[in-house]
Amino acid sequence: MSTLAPERPVRGTALNIALIVSGSISCYKACELISMLLKDGHQVQVVATKAALRFVGTASFEGLTDRKVYTSMWAPRESKTHISLRRWADLFVFYPATANRINQLAAGMAEDLIGASFLANNFEKPFWIAPAANTNMMLHPATQQGLKILEGWGCSIVYGESGRLACGDVGIGRLAEPAVLRSMIREYARTLAQTRRSGLLHGGRGEGVSGRPPRALVSGGAMTLPVDAVRSIVNTSSGRTAAATVAALLDAGWSVTYLAHQSASVQDCEGARILRYSTFADFEAILRQQLAADDFDLVVHAAAVSDYYLAAGGTAAKQETGDSFSLQLAPNPKLLPQVKEMAAGSGRKEPFVIGFKLTVHQNEQEGRARALSYFRDGRVDLVIWNDLDGVSGEQHAFSILAPPPAEQSVSAAQAPVVGRGTTLAELSAEVLRLAEFAIVTVPPGQQASAR
């Protein structure tokens, strides 16, 4: 019997990945990929050829995965490993796959564990192949035909970029970089998570909708105020908070549209629909269009919206160097309080709205007071307050504020704190927790009491 754990349901986006490794000089990249996948929360089981273990030792693979490396069907109690792998794995990744192994798979040969696992799977689970070979070996008719056969059967072929090979030749055959596979696996895992959620009935603001995952619109990043043809005023927002929130929602199976400034981070946002903006006018137009086009369950408004527009002093030409000039700024309208109205005015459901309030050199008590205005008329459901003094790198001190109790007036009350944390990871996890609670769990009419 195999020592593999029994088949289990995938939770969130954590996958069981069978990583097949064959004998190539690029085997060392498999170690980097394993490290990345483990950091993303996946379980990795290595299946290696004897040739692969000449390049990277068993100890390296076992040290990384904390699992025995499978190499043979003839080891004691492992005669059914090829069947156990098929049951356990959510995804097979052959990385790297040599020309020899590609042609063996295409011929349907099952003389060892890799071939037997390939046939036993029979495409119940996805099978990805990342070739690694000399250019001439890749271009040989046998290898090209083998790749076509495998792709025709349902394998996904992941090619690397053309470039210099270890042998000194220049051309195709390079192994795809670990980061490419990591990104693909992350997007695939999130697609699975969305599929699982699509069949669920969502209570609360989900209106009992079935057949689709919950939908979120997240905004993030700076905003550009052009002064002339080559100069502009831009705030310092990086979009990292929004990107972390997008990633957390995607990992939980949400469908996410990310409205991001042209300079904003989109790190770890594979699977999101990303729309770029530059100016306030761009942002407002896209925001209105999206809220009119779809029913969003959640809006997380983290973009650092420009407070001012250029009323006078700007030019479409280039302001000459050395000349003095003055700019007149006038306040922009506040968009956050209009989000629910934008949606409802287009015949769409009102989303649950989370806004952000950044202060400078203020404590939580002062921040709570500043956030109160957001809760007037129920225009915002939660406000995340943070102060610039508490934001540095991964440190991201924050408090999540809810509206005052209904019996208290906004002007006389303090916004209750429903969550706190000190890091960006904690912030994104809290946003997800509260969004799930408010949108999925709480039936209509009970949200006020739940706060």
Image: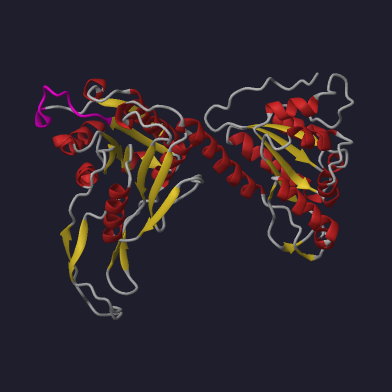
Disc count in the image? 0
Q: Observer-nearest residue: 273 or 423?
A: 273
230 to 31, vertically: above or below: below
In the displayed structure, does residue 338 sit left or right of residue 391? left
Residue 122 position in % (x across, y down): 73, 36
Residue 276 position in % (x across, y down): 39, 57
Indicate whether residue 411 is drawn in magenta: yes
In the displayed structure, does residue 347 sit left or right of residue 297? left
Res 119 visible: yes
In the displayed structure, does residue 421 sit left or right of residue 63? left
Q: Observer-nearest residue: 121 or 53?
A: 121
Residue 139 position in % (x across, y down): 81, 62
Residue 149 position in % (x across, y down): 77, 51
Q: Main secondary structure of the magenta part?
A: loop
In the displayed structure, does residue 58 sit left or right of residue 270? right
Q: Observer-nearest residue: 169 or 127?
A: 127
Which quadrant holds the N terminus? Answer: top right
Display coloring? secondary structure
The residue range painted magenta reads 401-412
Indicate whether residue 116 is drawn in magenta: no
The residue positioned 67% from the left and 35% from the top of the image is: 125
